[in-house]
Image (cartoon, helix red, strand yellow):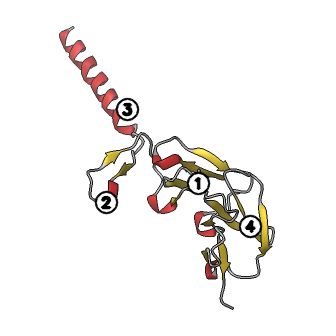
Amino acid sequence: MKTSNIFSSILVLLFCVGICSSVQAQPKWRIASGGTATWQDQPVGSGWEVALHSYHDFDGDGKTDIFTAKNGQFLYSSAGKTTWKTLNSRYAHAGLTSDKLRFGDFNGDKKMDVFFKYKGYYGYVSIANSQFIRLRKADAPLNQLGFGDFNGDGKTDIFWQR
């Protein structure tokens, strides 16, 4: 009887170790203020590669948000502290990966917009408007475009050398 209890205890222990080792905790994000402060754990994280994220202020609060295109959705976490929020999923189809996206404030609202090619045109979507705002025909290769406010009007301009 005593041997049976020990054997049962060992089986339960092995079962628990197997379950515990197969369940992995969601990785947490860590931020070091100014790059010199001690790491501060954030309340959220993801198992997605850091290189697949982009870092811009999508909600206009003055803090950098974390953005990714994943599973057919544009997602962001406000300042890396909130759970993922959908920025826009109407145009984020499976073929629209992070290397096919660019960012800028094309409407001048001080919030980052997502720029991409859709149906032969370049345009963007923003957090405020879930519609694709068509800008111009996609007649220049995306990898040869530059972005900045070249005329000082508060909106992102597109630069291309032909």
Q: On the picture, is 90 further left or further right than 31?
A: right
Residue assigned mark 4: 123
Q: Give residue 31's position: percent from left, percent from top.
A: 36, 52
Amino acid type, label 2: Gly
Q: Tags 2 and 4 in contact by the CB under 8 Å rule? A: no
Q: Give residue 30's position: percent from left, percent from top.
A: 36, 49
Check the image and name the residue furthest to the front: 152
Q: Residue at x 19, y 14 (%)?
A: 3
Check residue 35 in the rendering and tell me which mark sits there, or answer none.
Answer: 2
Q: Secondary structure at mark 2?
A: helix
Q: CA distance from mark 4 to mark 3?
A: 48 Å
Quadrant where the C terminus sits is bottom right
Return the disc, 2 or 1, that comes first in the chain's sequence. Answer: 2
Q: Is residue 25 visible?
A: yes
Amino acid type, label 1: Phe
Q: On the picture, is 140 further left or further right than 102?
A: right
Residue assigned mark 3: 19
Q: CA distance from mark 4 to mark 1?
A: 16 Å
Return the disc, 4 or 1, that comes first in the chain's sequence. Answer: 1
Graded by Cα atoms within 10 Å as few (under 14), some (14 to 19) or many (20 or more), the crowding at tag 3 reads few
Check residue 113 in the rendering and tell me which mark sits there, or answer none.
Answer: none
Classify residue 155 by image quadrant. bottom right
* Marks 4, 1: nearer the viewer: 1
Q: Secondary structure at mark 3?
A: helix
Return the disc, 2 or 3, that comes first in the chain's sequence. Answer: 3
